[in-house]
């Protein structure tokens, strides 16, 4: 199989690339990125692209499964419009091109609480994206909704504080369904979903943990 990844420079995307390299099912990994990866492996085919100019390179989107892990934070983006462009526009446009090129399977990393009717901007954006990609007509559309993520060597203080707070609440039996999950575990679950799920599927955090072997 040939895998395609967008968001390979992010925490989950990096873990996913590592897992794909260890899986004999995959022959090649095509990563579409704005800057080079630090990974040097003959299996990894790097495409340096401008996501604003997809028509220039859309013909290069060829493979058996698209893993869509692209995303940014509001702080990094600078505005809601800028975050929408990365989290929604780039992912939808890429998925649309992949579908037009005959890629049969999409595995999209969304978020717990995604809801197109939400009053919370981030959850609404993720819900809208879920709705949009479901309408593209992939043979298999698998949407995973992880809880808060634990990133290795994260320098996001707000994220660190949130994870610690949730863990403390979890210990006393509060908000266990929102227990943080490592990006490695999410990546493992996404890979399992790709290999074993068919049709349109929405995978919530509890099932993600099972698919990852109950790994944090």
Image: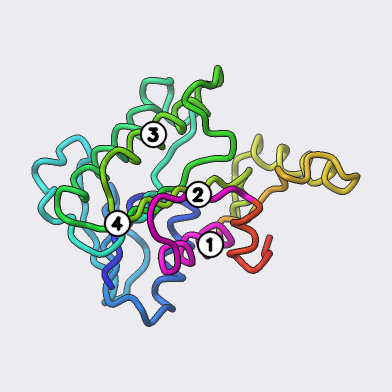
Local SS, label 1:
helix
Q: Main secondary structure of the magenta part?
A: helix
Residue 203 falls within the magenta-colored stretch: yes
* Badge 3: residue crowd in 10 Å (few <14, some 14–19, many ≥20): few
* Badge 2: residue crowd in 10 Å (few <14, some 14–19, many ≥20): many
What residue would you read off at disc 2?
144
Disc ID at residue 36:
4
Of residues 189 and 14, the one drawn nearer to the viewer in this rendering: 189
The N terminus sits in image quarter: bottom left
Residue 51 in picture, x, y percent from top left: 23, 40
What residue would you read off at disc 3?
131
Tell me where residue 113 sits by quadrant. top right
Question: Disc 3 vs disc 2: which is toward the camera?
Answer: 3
Local SS, label 3:
helix
Q: Are marks 2 and 1 in contact (CB under 8 Å)?
A: yes
Local SS, label 2:
strand
The C terminus sits in image quarter: bottom right
Residue at the spot x=26%, y=63% of the render? 30
Q: Earlier in the sequence, mark 2 or mark 1?
A: 2
Residue at the spot x=64%, y=39% of the render? 159
Tell me where residue 63 sits by quadrant. bottom left
Residue 177 in picture, x, y percent from top left: 72, 45
What residue would you read off at disc 1?
189
Its colouring scheme is: rainbow
User: As drawn, which residue projects farthest toward the top?
Assistant: 119
- Between the residue at mark 3 and the residue at mark 1, the CA separation in whole angstroms equals 21 Å
Along the horizontal axis of the image, is 101 left or right of 16?
Answer: left
Q: Earlier in the sequence, mark 3 or mark 2?
A: 3
């Amino acid at each position: 199989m040939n895998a395609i990844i967008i968001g390979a420079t992010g925490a989950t995307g990096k873990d996913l690339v590592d897992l794909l390299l260890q899986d004999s099912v995959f022959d090649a990994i095509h990563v579409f990125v704005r800057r080079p990866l630090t990974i040097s492996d003959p299996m990894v085919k790097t495409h340096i692209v401008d996501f604003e100019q997809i028509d220039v390179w859309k013909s290069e989107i060829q493979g058996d499964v698209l893993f869509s892990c692209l995303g940014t934070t509001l702080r990094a983006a600078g505005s809601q419009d800028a975050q929408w462009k990365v989290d929604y526009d780039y992912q939808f446009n890429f998925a649309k091109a992949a579908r037009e090129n005959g890629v049969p399977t999409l595995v999209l990393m969304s978020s717990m609480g995604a809801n197109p009717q939400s009053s919370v901007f981030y959850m609404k954006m993720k819900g809208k994206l879920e709705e949009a990609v479901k309408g593209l007509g992939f043979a298999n559309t698998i949407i995973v909704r992880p809880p808060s993520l634990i990133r290795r060597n994260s320098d996001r203080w707000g994220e660190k504080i949130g994870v610690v707070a949730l863990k403390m609440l979890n210990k006393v039996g509060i908000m266990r369904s929102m227990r943080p999950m490592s990006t490695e575990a999410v990546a493992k679950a996404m890979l399992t979903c790709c290999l074993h799920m068919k049709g349109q599927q929405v995978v919530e955090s509890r099932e993600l943990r099972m698919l990852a072997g109950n790994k944090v």
